Amino acid sequence: MTEVIDEHLMRIHYLYRNSPKRLRELREIGRRIEKTVVKPPKASGTRWIAHRLAATEAMMRNIHAITVHLEDQASGQRRDIRGDDQNRIKGYLKTLKSEKFKVYIHLYAVILRILARLSLSLQKTGRTVGEVKVEVMSCMAEMNALCNKTDIQLRLLGGQTPSDDEDDEQLALAQVPSLHDMKGTYTTIKQCLSERFDNLVSSKELGAMLVFEPTNWQEEDIDALHLYGADEVNLLVENYRHSLIMNGCNIDNVLVQFNNLKLDATLNKYITTFTSFWQMIIRKKRDRYNDLLHLVVIIMAIPISTSNVERTFSAIKRILGDWRLVLKATTVEALLRITSEGVDPMKFDAAPVVERWRDQGPKLMML
């Protein structure tokens, strides 16, 4: 049924995108029935979850106005509507007015909202393993709850409500098609999420990395703080033993420095967010915690998602346009680094760069 909904969303999108006149009429109907109408967006695109959610929510918002408008278009009273268009619109109208479509599109929006929250969290930069793990487990819990709902609960969730003289039991006996298709969709998505994120949820190594989150070092008891994370650090040291030794790390000092840092950070109260904290330690206290930082750098280098890589590909498309096809590889790399890692243009101080350029020698000035 989700394929039917996607297809119908695209049909409605093109119906109004290709005819400004129809869109004007739809908005006029919305004004008359006191409903704000939004232009039906495209249900496909690069960010496919966000596009489908936007199109689904627009359909739920516009469905009354669209139904009234299509009834007028299919009435046979309009001379400006061709016969084949009338038949096509009648097919659209039949789907829109069906009780199954109305319930299913609400249930479709529910699952798209859950997936959109997870997708957005994976696209954010600077997310830690712990933060993403919480988002994934929350999404999985919501999916489990949906899969365990009864047909009555799903119909209520889908916007079908009993009348004043009808209770929930009677609602279950209403002449509405079974929700077996949507339950199957929920189960399939749940299985896909489980397979995709199984390593993140069940991996002992990834779970052990949570002890490097400084906001977890809130133990008031010094002895308890000293013991916190010892097993996890030893597990990670053993897992990355070869890489640590090859890079000159004294693995016997890692746990000792970890314990010292926990006490140092707690007593001096400079615990902040994960990224800010470890950037500060790397910048200001590298000599003191050098062996521990070998392990921390490995942890910080583990990519949580591919969003940064995808943004880099998008940046390449902007850099290498029709007028810039002969750039050297070093120039492209420098521009990519500026785009992905550079300072915000609004905060960039250009004076030192200009002075450096000026001090390099005479320049050919173009007037």
Image: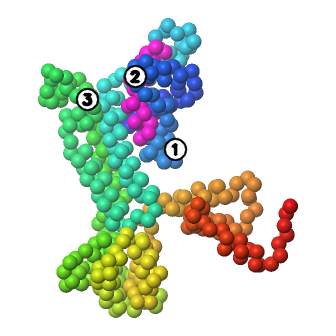
* Disc 1: which residue: 45
Disc ID at residue 34: 2
Q: Residues within 10 Å of mark 3 (few under 14, many from 20)?
A: some
**Chief SS of the magenta region:** helix
Q: Residues within 10 Å of mark 1 (few under 14, many from 20)?
A: few
Q: Are marks 3 and 1 in contact (CB under 8 Å)?
A: no
Residue type at mark 3 is Gln
Q: Is residue 232 visible to us here?
A: no
- Residue 246 position, x and y percent, is 46, 88
Decide whether residue 55 is among the magenta residues: yes
- Residue 64 position, x and y percent, is 38, 23
Q: Do the residues labelled 3 and 2 touch (CB within 8 Å)?
A: no
**Would you say 284 lies left or right of 190 here?**
right
Residue type at mark 1 is Gly
Of callouts 1 and 2, which one flags the residue occurring earlier in the amino acid sequence?
A: 2
Segment tinted magenta in the rendering: 53-74
Tag in front: 3 or 2: 2
Residue shown at 49% from the left, 35% from the top: 41
Q: Locate the N terminus and report the quarter of the image it occupies.
A: top left
Q: Is mark 3 on a helix, strand or loop?
A: loop
- Cα distance in 3D space between marks 3 and 2: 22 Å
| Coloring scheme used | rainbow
Q: Is residue 267 visible to us here?
A: yes
Residue shown at 53% from the left, 62% from the top: 309
- Residue 283 position, x and y percent, is 47, 81
* Disc 3: which residue: 160
Q: Residues within 10 Å of mark 2 (few under 14, many from 20)?
A: few
